[in-house]
Image (spheres, rainbow, N blue to C red):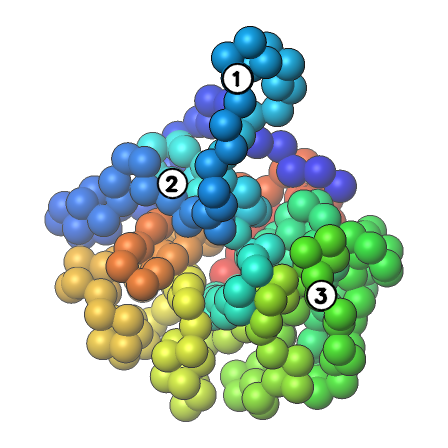
Amino acid sequence: MTVTHPTTPATPAVPSAPGDAFRTAVRRGFGLLGPRHRRHTLPAEQVDALALPIGDDGVVIGVDAQGQPAVLGVNRPTPYDVLLIGGLWTAQVIALRAAATGARVAVETGRAAAWAQLVQALGVGPSGMSVHDVGRVPPQGASAGSPVLVVRDCGMRPPRGRVVSGPWQSVLTLLPYLSPVAPRLIRQARLVGVQRVSPDEAAQIGRSVGLPSGDVEALPTLSDGVTLWCGDRDRQYVMTQATDAENGLLGTARRMD
């Protein structure tokens, strides 16, 4: 399966946060950028030979308020941990798109049936998906030629994983709601995504991540498919829109499973 990168994406109906917090948080040109590499040089006379654009690499996980693609670089030469406090639908879309970029996806879950359709669609092997019981993920042998995304769908209290992030192996942990283990997971994550939560949960997340009051007030009002992604210094509201193929496999965007 492939991911279509729109050249002029339509601006989605992303809900506005109270006041001006949303507009100031989401700036034009802001993105979840992939890993940066040294720039390549090319003699001017050879430019016409180029057939592909050069830019940041990664998984297109949606669009921002200006309709610009938001890219998440999961194939990295350094360890990378992502925490998603949200729904299974968004985690599965990210897994599908990571596989479309050539990564192998290993899913650690207590609900294998929820992932069965994706495994059937992707197959097992290179650029495929494997599903394992909680605590039973074998070493994946990640490398630059065979990057891996480990998705941990282990409920409210996921145990510490046997397979952790490393070079060319990123880990995405799905947490349906806030739980006692959330502070630890937030601290160790390089990137935290938050979908619609209760006002009490929003206040706790705001303290842990350092969100301004406008974002804290916005979190309980987010629409299905909208995620606030928080990095070390930046934050970004992203609307994930499914392709026709993804809709056929997963249905429409939803926060609840």
Label 3: which secondary element: loop
- In the figure, is residue 66 to the left or right of 179? left
Q: Earlier in the sequence, mark 2 or mark 1?
A: 1
Which mark lies nearer to you, 3 or 2? 3
Residue drawn at (35%, 50%) of the image: 237
**Secondary structure of the residue carrying numbered label 1:** loop
Image x and y of residue 127, in percent? 78, 52
For this rendering, which residue is in front, 78 or 203? 78
Between the residue at mark 3 and the residue at mark 1, the CA separation in whole angstroms equals 35 Å
26 sits to left or right of 165: left
Which of the labelled discs sits on residue 64, or is there none? 2
Residue that mark 3 sits on: 142
Can residue 114 be seen here? no
Q: Position of residue 106 (x, y in %)?
A: 72, 68
Look at label 3 and name its amino acid.
Ala
Residue 84 lies left or right of residue 203; in this view the side is right
Image mark for residue 43: 1
- Up/down of 253 relative to 245, above or below: below
Lower position in the chain sequence, tag 3 or tag 1: 1
Which residue appears at 60% of the width and 66% of the height? 167
Query: Would you call the spot at circle 2 few (<14 residues within 10 Å), some (14-19), or many (20 or more)?
Result: many
Q: Which amino acid, by three-letter code, is at mark 2?
A: Asp
The mark lying in front, picked from 3 and 1, is 1
Which one is in front in this view, the residue at disc 2 or the one at disc 1?
1
